[in-house]
Image (spheres, coloured by chain):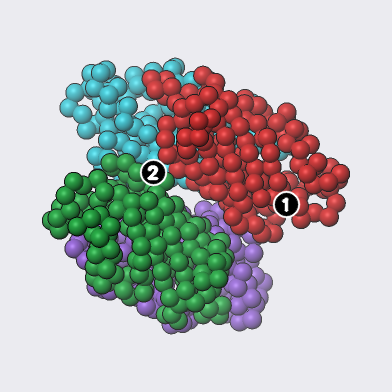
Chain colours: A red, B cyan, C green, D purple
């Protein structure tokens, strides 16, 4: 199985098994060692401020953290010679977010939101990713920067 | 009605009406212009990593953002001479998170989590708060820093 | 005098009169309301770690903060109808950095360093800029995000 | 030689040999694996804004980064069984700042400034410290958070 196939299987597996991502409707639609895409469809349960009908900032932070986390995960996996389920599970057990900065640029209004991540620092121990979130019209909702433990 | 009474009424109102906070089980238990407390009870739906049964980082960020947001809100309200519902609603409509940094210190394991915020900069336009999250045993889970638009 | 001419005069004035920028050799070479460029030439006095001959992280943070600050300043100035010295001085007296995040990607090695900033949020009270620093070979040294009080 | 003696010797060595710290007048006055203190005396060359006579934000960031860096260094050293110069040099060559957030609370006015750091996460690969800067009157000038590579 190639890395790309493994990534797609992992995305499907995570989308189906990660409780909080399912609760929010976060879906990984693409990822490799350079970039990732996470989408989320508007749902009234995601509202932070009921008067203004905008996304809770925690939803935005969750989407950005997931996008950054999967691109960091891909960085771990592409350094592995073999991709057996055991080795994947063991390698990814070391993955965790060290810190995350979210910059909220505009109110989170829209029907669908797309979070994208790009790796800006990849190493054997720490990876750093920059993220963006736009709505379906292309309005820029948020920026993010995440530092991840990868080894 | 005193500011303290207004704050307790507001906390109850927000706890009952903010959809995303209800979805996660976030509850504001105390707040004034200097500090705030938000609690959240463990629920399997909040799990990020199913293998390790730890909170999703987005839950932590959401709790910290809420704790910081309410202390910023209290800062706005204490500057008002009158606390009618209209003036409160109008004043708080200007409140929004500009940026949020979350530092994840330990895996989010526990039965209950307490997020606390303290104001570190209060002004007529921008307020800054520092936040912490501990579990019921006192383990320090996360730190946060939030910058809020208040005017 | 057009805004562009005013910006160039201001850049020259700042380059000549800001003590810490002169001490470090920071030079504003371009700025408008969308982006700015700050350059710095290697000097042994800027070394942080003498064993490895790399820039002190504080030099990098200083260059990024200056690049973000001038693009925020340009945002203030372009909102003014008139650009007399008094109005410029009064308007810019409200400018200050609220917070700054620096992500160090690679050791700061090189002969010359270029810090660039782009505005990502502009408002009447707060502006946010994203910054990058590269060396003369194009190696990407650092990323930054700055939040500025502008009104 | 005990760890404490080694730390004091290192502080003196760094104070005398780190070019940028000397240029700014940054002095490490105390450090161990839990906390550190860095002081800086006002000097006109450190001025950012000449109209207002306040410290350049880069000076503040430099002082906070140094305070956090030395407490991270102490964390590395206390994990070593032996403290020969070679082992110290080799261990500290892995130390670098991954990211640094600075929150500017008040204008940097005063005669002397004290930056303090406390470790909030210590590990074999990454350490996180929180920093504060006050002036000689106890006015709180800035907060900082730094993530450091230590292994």
Label 1: how many Cα within 10 Å (few below 14, some 14–19, many 20+): many
Mark 2 residue element: strand
Seen from the viewer's position, the closer of residues C151 and A134 is: A134
Seen from the viewer's position, the closer of residues B126 and C64 is: C64
Q: Quadrant of residue B35?
A: top left
Query: Horizontal and vertical percent for residue D31?
Result: 47, 68
Q: Measuring 55% from the left and 67% from the top, which residue is drawn there?
A: C138
Mark 1 residue element: helix
Seen from the viewer's position, the closer of residues D26 and C95 is: C95
Query: Horizontal and vertical percent for residue C37?
Result: 40, 62
Residue lying farthest to the front in this orientation: C2
Q: Is residue D114 visible?
A: no
Query: Horizontal and vertical percent for residue C85?
Result: 15, 58
The residue under label 2 is C121
Label 2: how many Cα within 10 Å (few below 14, some 14–19, many 20+): many
Q: Is residue D85 visible?
A: yes
Question: Quick check: do tags 2 and 1 share a chain?
Answer: no
Q: Which numbered circle lies on residue A76?
A: 1
Chain letter behind tag 1: A
Chain letter behind tag 2: C
């Amino acid at each position: 199985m190639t890395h790309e196939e493994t990534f797609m299987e992992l995305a499907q597996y995570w989308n189906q098994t990660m409780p909080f991502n399912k609760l929010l409707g976060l879906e990984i639609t693409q990822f490799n060692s350079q970039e990732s895409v996470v989408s989320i469809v508007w749902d009234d349960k995601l509202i932070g401020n009921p008067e203004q009908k905008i996304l809770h900032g925690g939803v935005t932070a969750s989407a950005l953290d997931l996008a950054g986390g999967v691109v960091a995960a891909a960085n771990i996996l592409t350094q592995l010679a073999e991709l057996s389920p055991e080795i994947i599970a063991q390698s990814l057990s070391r993955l965790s977010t060290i810190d995350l900065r979210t910059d909220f640029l505009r109110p989170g209004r829209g029907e669908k939101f797309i979070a994208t991540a790009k790796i800006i620092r990849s190493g054997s121990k720490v990876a750093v990713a920059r993220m963006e979130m736009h709505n379906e019209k292309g309005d820029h909702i948020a920026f993010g920067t995440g530092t991840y433990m990868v080894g």
